[in-house]
Image (tube, helix red, strand yellow):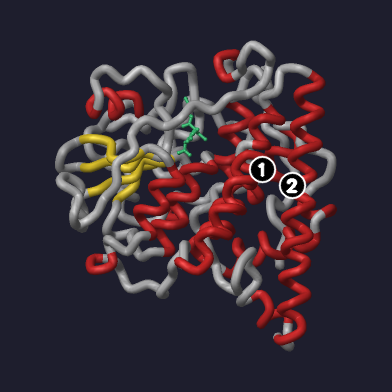
Amino acid sequence: MSKKFASEDGSFKRQVSSFRETISATHPIYKPEKGRYWLYVSLACPWAHRALITRVLKGLTSVIGISVVHWHLDEKGWRFLPYDDSNKPDDVSFTPSAELKPYDELSNSGVENHSIRYGTDGTIDHNYHFERLSQLYFKSEPEYSARYTVPVLWDLKTQTIVNNESSEIIRILNSGVFDKVADPHPDIDLLPKELESEIDEINSWVYDNINNGVYKTGFAEKQEIYEKEVTNLFKHLDKVESMLKGRYETLKTTHFSEEDILKSFYLLGNQLTEADLRLYPTLIRFDPVYVQHFKTNLNTIRSGYPYIHLWLRNLYWNDKAFHDTTNFNHIKWHYTRSHTRINPLSITPLGPSPNILPL
Ligand SMILES: N[C@@H](CCC(=O)N[C@@H](CS)C(=O)NCC(=O)O)C(=O)O
């Protein structure tokens, strides 16, 4: 990762997203329709991961297609696998990302930054056969001059980016605008009215101190900044731990078995909400990558945070939307081989094994 991510004082600054439209029946341009919108994602990226999970939870896998960039990010940004007419690439466009072929989690040797294994390293751009994500940004906005980030919610009709801010994309997908065309799915509202203000409150400190906190720790370019950020990060993990401990103890008074407790073991109000969804992508990456790569190593989730660990494994092992969108290979390869300022030799650690413990 180059110096351009850090500001003069050595701290990491995340840029703001530039496409901020929505989709609704009353929107002059972007109306809800099956097959009209497309998600461009990276399976490594925690922000894109939120959108992928929401897409599955809301029964939108046959409504909104996806293309997955190669896990390796280089100086020109994200790229797709090359389109080649003679070579029929696996079409994963209308299936959840889990359909990407699993790969032995310990066989990192032989994995090259330029490897082209369709359905393993990523997919083609199904719509335009573009080589780079940047081309999509320029197609939408020829004057575009910021970074080419995922996720991108794309409109195939106007050929423009609707939105590239994950927190807004998940609200669009959750809003119910696609309900009439969605696949059958459990009735899930990630942002119930009565919990909205609490969710917003949790989101704001989780974003700043945990979701972005791991990046601020890992990309710190000065010892004092690193120490300040890592300490702050763990202070907020402690806060999540005590919230979940409280939730567990409350549930224990009314639920007989652990199996029963787990059915309601979420941050807020006995139900899965956006607060859980926005925390998960960071915490599932924590032990496998952030602990060593971003030096967030004051503790691990598995040995220092029993309630977070239980919550995390419950989501991963008991909810397909979380499990099937989590690709530890993309996660590990991406960080360890793309951030060459942090890891100049691009050697991917084998551990921890397993990436996540059984429930
Ligand atoms: N605010 C954005 C942030 C997205 C973001 O930073 N994505 C990273 C990957 S995790 C990216 O695409 N970076 C590419 C680059 O900076 O070149 C969101 O939440 O949607």
Q: Are marks 1 and 2 in contact (CB under 8 Å)?
A: yes
Coordinates of residue 349 in the picture (x, y in percent): 72, 35
Q: Amino acid at mark 1?
A: Ile
Q: Identify the residue at image location x=23%, y=35%.
A: 160
- Judge left or right: residue 276 versus residue 343: left
- Judge left or right: residue 123 versus residue 279: left
Can residue 56 be seen from the camera position used here?
A: yes
Q: CA distance from mark 1 to mark 2?
A: 7 Å
Q: Amino acid at mark 2?
A: His
Q: Quadrant of residue 211?
A: top right
Coordinates of residue 184 in the picture (x, y in percent): 33, 73
Compared with residue 159, is residue 268 higher up or lower down, i.e. above or below? below
Say which of 281 and 253 sits in front: 253
Q: Quadrant of the C terminus?
A: bottom right
Assign a secondary structure to mark 1.
helix
What residue is pinned by disc 1? 210
Q: Identify the residue at image location x=34%, y=38%.
A: 20
Assign a secondary structure to mark 2.
helix
Count of numbered circles on the image: 2
Q: Identify the residue at image location x=64%, y=32%.
A: 215
What residue is pinned by disc 2? 236
Q: Quadrant of the N terminus?
A: top right
Cβ(mark 1) to ligand 1 < 8 Å? no
Coordinates of residue 269 in the picture (x, y in percent): 60, 71
Coordinates of residue 288 in the picture (x, y in percent): 69, 44
Tell me the crowding category of disc 1: few under 14, some 14 to 19, or many 20 or more residues within 10 angstroms, Cα based.
many
Say which of 259 and 288 sits in front: 259
Q: Give whichever of discs 1 and 2 has the lower sequence position.
A: 1
